[in-house]
Image (cartoon, rainbow, N blue to C red):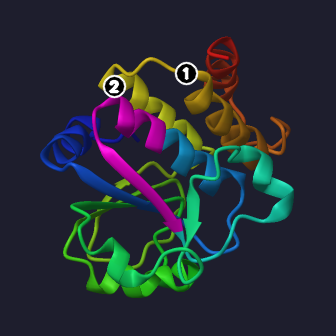
C-alpha cells in the first residue's frame, strides 16, 4: 500500500505557508513526525509552523530541543493561523483526537491533508495520504523525504528515529519489519 507522494509533493509546491498539527496527548510518533516533516518542508523552501492542541509532555521535551512546537491557547491563538495555505494533519485522522485544533481544522481556509498510518478515518474534509501497513507515521515522513530528494540532517533524522522506535516498542512489536530496521539504520547513519 503505497502513498502517491507525487500528488503530495505537488500540493506542497503550490503552497508556501504550512501548518502542521497532530493529536492530543502527543506521543513520539506525533511529535517526531511533525518535527521531521517541518525539516523536510523547510528544505523545500516552505515556511512551517507546528501547533498542537495539547502541550508536549515534559517527558518527551527532549524531542524538541528548539521548542518549535506551539500549543493552541497558550502561545498561539486561532486567529494567528489565518494566513496558512496548507494544513497537514499527522498521525491521526479522527476528530476526537484533534482536541482544540479541531476548531482550526473546521474553520481554516487552508487546503487540508492527512498523513497517517492508522486504519480509522473521519471525514476531516482533507485529502488522505495513508498507509495503514506502515508501523509509524514517522516512516511515512521518511518516505516523503526520500521521494522529494531531501537530504537527511540530524534535525530531521533524530525525531523520525524517535517516532519509529517508540511506535514499534523499540523495534520489539510485530509491526517492526525489515523495512523498519532499514529505516532506523538510515536515520542513524544520518546523525
Q: Position of residue 173 (x, y in %)?
A: 81, 43
Look at the image and tell me in which quarter the N terminus lies.
Answer: top left
Q: Position of residue 166 (x, y in %)?
A: 78, 46
Does the segment drawn in magenta span residue 48? yes
Q: Is residue 147 left or right of residue 100?
A: left
SS at circle 2: helix
- Mark 2 crowdedness (10 Å alpha carbons): few <14, some 14-19, many ≥20: few
Numbered circle sitting on residue 60: none
Q: Position of residue 159 (x, y in %)?
A: 65, 39
Numbered circle sitting on residue 147: 2
Does the segment drawn in magenta span residue 37? no
Numbered circle sitting on residue 153: 1
Spatial CA span between label 1 and label 2: 15 Å
On the image, which quarter does residue 4 sit in?
A: top left
Outermost residue, left side? 14
| Of 33 and 57, the residue lying toward us | 57
Q: Are marks 1 and 2 in contact (CB under 8 Å)?
A: no
**Nearer-N-terminus badge (1/2):** 2
Look at the image and tell me in which quarter the C terminus lies.
Answer: top right
SS at circle 1: loop
Q: Is residue 97 visible?
A: yes
| Of 44 and 106, the residue lying toward us | 44
- What is the total number of numbered labels drawn onto the structure image? 2
Residue that appears at 56% across and 65% down: 70
> Magenta region: which residues?
38-51
Amino acid at each position: 500500500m503505497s502513498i502517491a507522494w507525487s500528488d503530495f509533493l505537488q500540493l506542497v509546491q503550490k503552497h508556501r505557508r504550512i501548518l502542521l498539527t497532530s493529536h492530543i496527548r502527543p506521543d513520539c510518533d506525533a511529535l517526531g513526525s511533525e518535527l521531521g516533516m517541518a525539516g523536510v518542508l523547510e528544505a523545500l523552501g516552505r515556511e512551517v509552523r507546528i501547533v498542537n492542541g495539547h502541550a508536549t509532555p515534559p517527558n518527551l521535551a527532549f524531542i524538541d530541543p528548539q521548542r518549535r512546537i506551539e500549543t493552541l491557547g497558550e502561545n498561539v491563538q486561532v486567529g494567528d493561523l489565518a494566513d496558512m495555505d496548507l494544513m497537514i494533519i499527522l498521525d491521526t485522522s479522527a476528530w476526537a483526537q484533534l482536541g482544540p485544533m479541531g476548531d482550526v481544522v473546521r474553520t481554516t481556509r487552508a487546503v487540508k491533508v492527512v498523513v497517517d498510518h492508522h486504519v480509522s478515518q473521519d471525514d476531516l474534509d482533507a485529502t488522505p495520504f495513508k498507509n495503514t501497513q506502515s508501523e509509524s507515521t514517522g516512516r511515512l515522513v521518511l518516505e516523503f523525504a526520500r521521494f522529494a530528494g531531501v537530504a537527511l540532517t540530524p534535525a530531521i533524522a533524530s525525531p523520525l528515529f524517535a517516532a519509529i522506535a517508540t511506535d514499534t516498542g523499540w523495534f520489539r512489536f510485530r509491526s517492526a519489519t525489515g523495512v523498519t530496521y532499514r529505516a532506523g539504520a538510515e536515520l542513524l547513519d544520518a546523525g
